[in-house]
Every structure is written in structure tokens, then in C-alpha cells.
Amino acid sequence: MQRTTARTRRARSLVTGAGTTLALLALAACSGGDDATSGSGGDDASGTGDTVTLVTHDSFAVSDEVLAAFEEESGLTVEQVAPGDGGALVNQLILTKDSPLGDVVFGIDNTFASRAIDEGVLAPYVPEGLSDSAASYAVGDGDELTAVDLGDVCVNVDHAWFADAGIPEPVSLEDLAKPEYEDLLVVTNPATSSPGLAFLLATVGAFGEDGWEDYWADLRANGVKVVDGWSDAYYVDFSGSEGAGPRPLVLSYSTSPAFTLTEDGSASTTGALLDTCFRQVEYAGVLANAKNPEGAQQLVDFLVSEAFQADVPGQMYMYPADDSVALPDGWAEFAPLADEPFEVAPADISAHRDEWIKAWTATVVD
């Protein structure tokens, strides 16, 4: 599944469009998965336990000064291991659970959370001072995973295309299957893309287990295009991006319109259809069999601290799980969350994820 490019480019968009400092842009560019180094799971070479290894996905990013402040205060050195996107991350944690890749994990989302818990890759730990808003996203028994950030996967629309064509913009999932929107939508494959899987779950939440396959059959009949990854959908096929593609509807994030601001920053040329969204929540947890469990707990504490939470929007373009943390200027206007995103219970996702992807493939692409 592809997400790294999406996160990176979306992060840069807000920084540029909202007029935030160029220094922050530089920090965004030099952080994240490319900087990840292989860890050894806890103790450093001297065996003093001064190193804590974070296993994460390839979209993780934190400002250098924020991480440095944590390392100075704790006396720990944070190393990173990034085995891939969220799906690859969980798979690797399961395969290595008896000898884990590190001490703590960040980036397990709500589409894979129950699988990680059921496979026993996590040790119980609840950080002190966890906000009520973060605690409200608890999964399982609530002590294996801690919510760190969240965001909405939604269909985006090119305002100018619809204005020029004299066609009203769609609003709902049902609208996307109507004849006036034939051959206008491009989405990503849920078997290869985490946004694609999130959108599949949105349709399961909207139409139920007995109705979502019929909906996708209608989308297929209406000319929906499927590509493997977000970058191709957004930058090649979507008319509202720099790729100037032919399709004015694309699967992306509710935060994506902040990437398409006008030069003066007063408006966006694209918008998110907030009645088509599925919410992704990302979690952190201490790994079972960690070599440095105390360091891992300190790192989880850091991930829910005000310093890290305030850094999340500019670095990873997600919302902090702690809703008391101040957001960047313009965030609420150009990067809104849906009021009522579609939901699917984590246990149902765990039980049916592979089955739904197989059925989707048979319905849409075979």
C-alpha cells in the first residue's frame, strides 16, 4: 500500500499554502522514513539501554528540535525502523513478535489494530495524562494501543471543472454512481493502497455487508477508474492537481484541499466531499518482548505529549488525537474533518478485511 508520498506532499502543501515558515518546510523534508535507520531492538551497542527503537511506517515524521528535546530530557537516543506502510508494518510485527524489530511501534491504524492485538505483539501500557479525546479512540481492552493522530479519507472534487461544465458537484456516495458523474472518478485499489482500503470500508459502513458490493458494481458500470496508488490517482488522473488529469473526482484526504490553495491563500481550488469519508486513527504501543520496555513507555508518553501532538499537523498532516492542542492557522477551513464519517467496528474489519478485499477485486477489477 502506498502512503508515503501522499503524506509528504500533503504536509508540504499546508506549510506553503498557509504561509507557515520555510524553516518548518525544511524540517518536514528532512524528517520521516528516508531518515529511518535499522535498529536492533532496545539496548544500544554498549548494552546500557540508552537507545529506544521505534518501529513505524514510512510516513512517520517529527520536527528535529521536538525529537531532540525529548532525547535530551529522557537521556534516550531514538532510532527508527520503517518496514513499509501500515499494512506491512503490522505484518512485520507479527512475523517478528518473538524477537521484535524494536521497543515501541507507531502507525498501527484502526483497519489493522485488532489484528495486531489478537496476534499478541503488544504489551499493556497506558500513558499517564492521556487526554480524554485520545482515550475515546481505545480499541480492544484499551491498554495495548494508544491513539496518537487521526484523519479522514474522502473523495475530493475539482471546483473549476464542475463550474466550467455546468454540472453540480456530487455530495454523497450515492451521487458518484449517477449518470452525470460517469467516467469522472478515480480511486485507489484497497489491495495496494491504505486510502483505498479506507474507502472500501466507508462503503461497507454506508451500505452494509449486504449492499456494498452492489454499490461498487454500480460504480464500475459508471466508469470508476482504479489505480494502485494515491500518487497516480492524484497527480496523473485528477484534474485538480498539478498533473491536470482528465478526472475531476479523486480519492484522497479531507486535508488535501490545503494543497491547492490559491496564490493569496484565501481559497482552495479543490474540496473534500465530507459525506464520503472514513476516519483513520493511528496508534502507538509498547512491543511485547521489547529489550527496553522502560524506554518504550517513555517514548509512548512523548508521542501523546503536547510537544509531539502540536507537531503532528505540520509533519504528518494528520490531526492530533489530543483535541485540546492548538491547530495551525487555516487548518479548520482548508483541512476539515467530517462531522459523521462512516464507521466499521474494528472486530468486523479484522474478521472480514481479506474477504472484503477479495470480493471487491472480483466485483470491480476482474
Image (cartoon, helix red, strand yellow):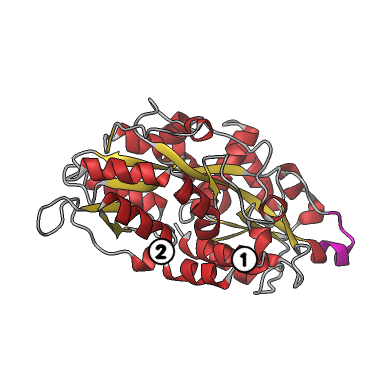
| Magenta stretch encompasses residue 163 | yes
Foreground residue among 280 and 179? 280
The quarter of the image holding the N terminus is: bottom left
What amino acid does circle 1 point to?
Answer: Thr
Foreground residue among 195 and 20? 20
Q: From the viewer's perspective, is 184 left or right of 117?
A: right
Please state the horizontal and vertical placement of residue 11, each as a whole percent of the image.
Answer: 55, 62
Q: Height in image: 125 above or below 197?
A: above
Q: Height in image: 331 above or below 274?
A: below
- Residue numbers of the magenta segment: 162-168
Alpha carbon distance from label 2 to label 1? 17 Å
Which mark is drawn over residue 64?
2
In what element is the residue under mark 2?
helix
Asked whether the residues under the numbered discs 2 and 1 touch, taking CB atoms below 8 Å apart as contact, a structural biologist would say no
Tally of numbered discs: 2
Residue shown at 57%/51% (left/top)?
Answer: 364
Residue shown at 63%/45% (left/top)?
Answer: 216
Choose the circle earlier in sequence order: 2 or 1.
1
In which quadrant of the rendered view does residue 258 lie? bottom right
In what element is the residue under mark 1?
loop
What amino acid does circle 2 point to?
Answer: Asp
Q: Residues within 10 Å of mark 1 (few under 14, many from 20)?
A: some
Instruction: Farthest residue to the left: give it.
Output: 46
Please state the horizontal and vertical placement of residue 185, each as a whole percent of the image.
Answer: 69, 58
| Magenta stretch encompasses residue 48 | no
Foreground residue among 280 and 300? 300
Q: From the viewer's perspective, is 66 left or right of 73?
A: right
Residue that mark 1 sits on: 20
Q: Is residue 250 visible?
A: yes
Foreground residue among 160 and 237? 160
